[in-house]
């Protein structure tokens, strides 16, 4: 959760044993205005400490109305944040020697206008190094076609040359926000957000991306998800868990937005994306319970494949795998999920007050919000095995 007020888009970055997550943050009110970069750090993925704000809008500067999403990379011993300034949208740079104190590049913006033929909505830099140069994606769109990830190249992270769209989607996705692009197993993965964070797996050749498989990382209250690569070689995904209550209620509560639990990505044998909770989360398991009760629980329920619905009901929200509809469902939210013939269904559920995060068989996730703390927790279907732990504070 934010210390208070507004939080959205995570920007994870791993450095020397520490998991850093920068995030979009409004320290003044629980409303998406005048966005800063907040900063949290963890050594174990389960205990987090808030650090000072990394970036704040500079009055009169190209980021005067907000420091929007971007990425953090290290080059020659110096950390670099590339991010978007708004009104109009432009790309900016800041550097730091310790990840705590950031200095904005005096020549900002480093890119002041979109490539010819593209609209003014182009943002959320994602940069990486290849053997010959730095490369970067910006989220954009090809009008009347769909979302696009525009590819740039640079030798110094300051001067950027536009190359071409790395990938253009279709009308299902009007614009790409928060692109993320990385190697995983023997594939490349492109994440792009538009209403949901979609994944695409495929081949990266000649600086073009050919998609072989695609899907949704999480069909629920989960957005703008991005990854880091840790020293164990793991790609770990964090998303912004959006609210399901009105703005008035968010203002009354004094906060808005949560970051998801860390989710480890993999390439499955069929080339699709695997998503599972980070194993470190088990360190927060407290008392084992025979019966699910409380408002901070981890539950693993294994069901024999049976026709219909298996799952739980928490705070009146039904959370279940539906074998007929081939979906993983939490309240109104659903993610495609198909069980193979004879495959057991394992639902790994984290309930934390208003947040429900569900993982099914290491390949489907759905996140939901449940604010009213009434009603018992009950099961849908009869599990073969059921493990319940309180989550330690
Ligand atoms: N949120 C940011 C944008 C991004 C959007 C602003 C996605 O940079 O495109 O807070 O949630």
Image (cartoon, helix red, strand yellow):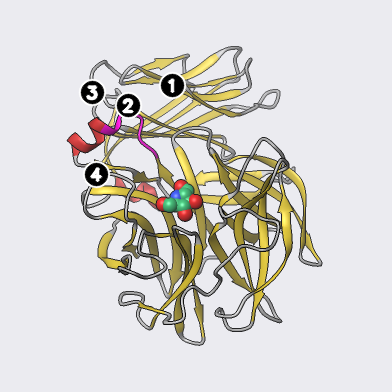
- Is the C-beta separation of discs 2 and 4 under 8 Å? no
Say which residue appears at 23% left-offset and 18% top-offset: 374
User: CA–CA distance between discs 3 and 4?
Assistant: 19 Å
**Image depth: mark 2 or mark 4 in front:** 2
Q: Earlier in the sequence, mark 1 or mark 2?
A: 1
Residue 339, disc = none
Check disc 4: other Cα within 10 Å, few if <14, some if 14-19, many if 20+.
few
Horizontally, residue 242 falls left or right of residue 271, namely left
View extreme (bottom): residue: 76
Q: Is residue 289 magenta?
A: no
- Is the C-beta separation of discs 1 and 2 under 8 Å? yes
The magenta segment is 242-247
Q: Earlier in the sequence, mark 2 or mark 4?
A: 2
* Secondary structure of residue under mark 1: loop
Residue 370, disc = 2
**Residue 9 image position (x, y, % from top left):** 42, 51
User: CA–CA distance between discs 4 and 1?
Assistant: 26 Å
* Residue with the mark numbered 1: 331
Q: Earlier in the sequence, mark 3 or mark 1?
A: 1
Say which residue appears at 48% left-offset and 43% top-offset: 223
* Secondary structure of residue under mark 2: loop
Which is nearer the eye, 44 or 331?
331
Check disc 2: other Cα within 10 Å, few if <14, some if 14-19, many if 20+.
many
Check disc 3: other Cα within 10 Å, few if <14, some if 14-19, many if 20+.
few
**Residue 244 image position (x, y, % from top left):** 36, 30
Q: Is mark 2 within 8 Å of ligand 1?
A: no
User: CA–CA distance between discs 2 and 4?
Assistant: 20 Å
* Residue with the mark numbered 3: 373
* Residue with the mark numbered 4: 392
Say which residue appears at 61% left-offset and 45% top-offset: 175
């Amino acid at each position: 959760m934010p210390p208070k007020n507004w939080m959205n888009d995570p920007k994870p970055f791993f450095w020397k044993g520490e998991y850093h997550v920068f995030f979009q943050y409004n320290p003044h009110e629980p409303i998406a205005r005048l966005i800063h970069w907040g900063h949290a750090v963890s050594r174990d993925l389960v205990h987090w400490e808030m650090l000072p704000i990394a970036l704040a809008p500079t009055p009169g500067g190209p980021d005067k109305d907000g420091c929007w999403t971007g990425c953090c990379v290290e080059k020659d011993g110096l950390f670099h944040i590339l991010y978007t300034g708004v009104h109009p949208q432009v790309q900016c740079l800041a550097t730091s020697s310790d990840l705590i104190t950031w200095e904005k590049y005096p020549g900002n913006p480093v890119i002041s206008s979109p490539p010819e033929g593209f609209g003014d909505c182009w943002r959320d830099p994602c940069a990486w190094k290849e053997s010959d140069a730095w490369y970067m994606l910006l989220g954009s769109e090809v009008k009347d076609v769909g979302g696009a990830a525009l590819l740039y190249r640079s030798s110094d992270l300051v001067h950027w040359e536009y190359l071409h769209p790395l990938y253009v989607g279709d009308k299902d996705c009007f614009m790409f926000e928060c692109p993320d692009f990385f190697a995983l197993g023997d594939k490349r993965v492109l994440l792009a957000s538009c209403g949901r964070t979609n994944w695409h797996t495929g081949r990266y050749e000649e600086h073009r991306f050919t998609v072989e498989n695609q899907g949704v990382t999480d069909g629920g209250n989960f957005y703008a998800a991005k990854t880091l690569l840790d020293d164990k070689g793991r790609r770990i995904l964090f998303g912004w868990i959006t609210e399901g209550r009105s703005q008035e209620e968010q203002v009354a509560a004094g906060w808005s937005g949560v970051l998801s639990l860390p989710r480890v990505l993999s390439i499955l044998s069929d080339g699709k994306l695997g998503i599972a909770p980070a194993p470190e989360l088990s360190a927060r398991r407290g008392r084992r319970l025979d019966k699910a009760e409380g408002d901070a629980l981890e539950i693993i329920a294994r069901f024999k494949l049976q026709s219909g619905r298996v799952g739980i009901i928490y705070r009146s929200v039904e959370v279940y795998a539906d074998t007929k509809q081939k979906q993983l469902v939490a309240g109104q939210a659903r993610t495609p999920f198909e069980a193979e013939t004879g495959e057991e269904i394992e639902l790994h559920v984290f309930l934390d007050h208003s947040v429900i995060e569900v993982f099914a068989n290491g390949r489907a996730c759905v996140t939901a919000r449940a604010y009213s703390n009434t009603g018992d927790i009950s099961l849908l279907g009869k599990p073969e095995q059921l493990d319940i732990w309180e989550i330690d504070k």
